[in-house]
Amino acid sequence: MRYVEEFRDPVAAKALIARIAEVTDEIGATKESPVRMMEICGGHTHAIFRYGLDRLVHEGIEFIHGPGCPVCVLPMGRVDEAVEIAEKPGVIFTSFGDAMRVPGTKKSLLQAKAEGADIRTVYSPLDALELARRHPDREVVFFGLGFETTTPSTALTIQQAAREGVENFSIFCNHITVPPPIKALLDDPHMLLDGFIGPGHVSMVIGVHPYDFISDEYGKPITVAGFEPTDLLQSVLMVLEQIRDGRAEVENQYGRVVPEHGNPVSLAAIADVYEERPSFAWRGLGEIDRSGLSIREKYAKWDAEARFGIGYGAARAREVAEPEGTECAAVMTGKIKPTGCPMFGTQCSPETPMGALMVSSEGACAAYYQYGGRRSPEAAE
Amino acid sequence: MCLGIPGQIVEITDTDRMTAMADVSGVKREVNVACIAETDPAELVGRWALIHVGFAMALIDEDEAAATLKALEHLGEAQETLEQIREGAEALS
C-alpha cells in the first residue's frame, strides 16, 4: 500500500479498500471475470494512476478509462484548423497549454509558433479577452476546448466581450458534452461496462440529472466522485454496492461541491451563448450525435468559425485518419490498454507524442507512461 | 483543466465585470466570480472557491480548500496550474 500513507485519511482509505474487497467477493468478481468500471473523467484517470488505486483495490475490479480528456478526443482536423487560423496575418492565437503539443496532420500549435505564428499560452479565456482590449489592431482568437467544466468560462467571456463591444475577439469553439459519448459507449455491443465513476467538476456545472439515462435506460449504476483518493475509493465502493444490491441509481459522493441541479449562472450562460451541433467528431469514437456545441447566431461576431470561414462542415469533408501505426482509437474506447499499442513508449512518448492520449496528464497513455502500467498489460479483452 | 485549484477571494476588483482578486497558493490572480456571487459580490471577500481557468465555480470551506490543494500537489496539478497562471500573465505583456 505504497501510497496510502499520503492520503488525507490513511485509516479511512485502508478501511475502504478492505470494504471494497469484501463487496467485490460478495459480487463474485475475479481477475478473470472482473467488474468493469469506467472512470469518465481524465482527472480521475490521472488520480487513479498517481495513487496506484488500480493496484490497491481487489483484482476483481478493472478500471476502463473513459473519454473525458478534452485534448485527447480532439480530432486532428480541428488542430489543423486551429493552426490555419493561427497562421493568418494579424492574428494572435491563444490556447491552454495542454493543446499546444497535440499533433495535427502537418504540425502542432507549438510547431506553428516556432515557425513564426503569434500563438500564446494563456491560463484563461479572460486573458485572451484582455489581449484583445490591449491590441485593438489585432484579431485575438481563443481555442475554446473542454467539457461542461470549462464551457461556462468561454460563454461568460463572450457575453463580456459583447457587453463591452470588443469586436476583435473570437472563440474557436470545440466544446463538447459528457452524456452523448457515454450513451455511444453504452450502445457499443463490444463495450461491456458494469458501472461508472461520474465526473465531479462537470457535474458541479450540470448537476447529476443529465446522467439519469444511464440508470433509467441502461440499468447501470453511476456515482459522481470527487478527486481525492478517498473520494474515489468511496465512489468505487458505492458503485459496487449498487451492483451487489441489483440497484442502478445516480449517486452523488461529491455533494460538498456538486449541487443536484448544477450551477444556475453557468447553465444560463451556456444556454444563452451555445447550441448543440447536429454531431461532432471525437478522436477514436467518430461522429457522435449532439455531442458538440457551436456559438449561436446572435454571437456570430465572436465565433471564429464564422469570422474566418472555417466551418465544421469543411472539417468533416476533409476528415483525417489517426497517425499510422497507432492504436489511439482502441485505447480511447477501452478495447486495449495503452501498453498494447506498438508505438507506446517507443515512437510515442510525452516528449514526442504521436497521439493526443500521450499529450495531456489526463490522457490514459501519459498516465501509464508516467506511473507504470497495471498488473495486466495485455489487451483488456 | 478539469481539476481547478482552490483560491481565496481577497478583493472585489470590478463589480460590472464581476471580477475579484484571488490568492492562489500565494499567487494573485484576477478571477471572474459571476458563478458564485448569489447576491452582493463583496460578501465573497475572505471566502474560498474552486477556480477553473480563471472562473470561480464553487464555494468551498477552508478545510476542503486545504485538502484539495494537497491532492492537487500530489498530482502535480497545483504546480502546473500556477505555471499556467504565470504564463497567462506573460502572454499579456
Image (spheres, rainbow, N blue to C red):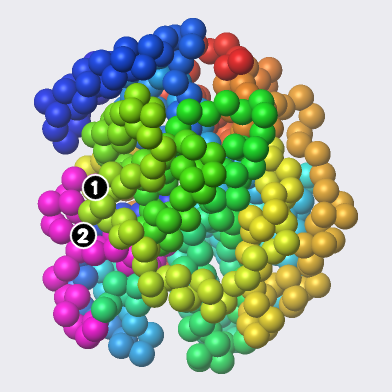
Three-letter amino acid code at the position of disc 2: Ile
Region rendered in magenta: B39-68
- Residue B60 image label: 2
Q: Position of residue A366 (x, y in %)?
A: 51, 31
Question: Which residue is at a point 36% across and 63% down the rendered structure image?
Answer: A261
Q: Quadrant of the C terminus of chain A?
A: top right
CA neighbours of label 1 inside 10 A, class few (<14), some (14 to 19), many (20+): many
Chain hosting mark 2 = B
Kindly state the secondary structure of the residue where label 1 is placed: helix
Q: Closer to the N terminus: mark 1 or mark 2?
A: 2
Q: In this view, does B56 lie above or below A374?
A: below
Instruction: Pick whichever, A298 or A7, lies toward us.
Output: A298
- On the same chain: label 1 and label 2? yes
The residue tagged 1 is: B68
| Quarter of the rendering containing residue A329 | top right
The answer to whether mark 1 and mark 2 are in CB contact below 8 A is yes
Label 1 is placed on what type of residue?
Thr
Q: In the image, residue B35 lies at what x, y percent?
A: 35, 72
Q: Mark 1 lies on which chain?
A: B
Whether residue A1 sits left or right of residue A80 in the image: it is left
Residue A354 in the image, given as x and y percentages of width and height: 68, 34
Q: State yes or no: residue A279 in magenta.
A: no
Question: How many numbered marks, from 0 up?
Answer: 2
Q: Position of residue A182 (x, y in %)?
A: 56, 43
Residue A291 found in image quarter: bottom right
The structure residue drawn at horizontal position 43% and vertical position 56%, both measured from the top left corner, is A209
Q: What element carries label 2?
A: strand
* Residue A25 seen in the current view: yes
Instruction: Kindly identify the residue that appears in the image at 29 percent across and 63 percent down.
Output: B58
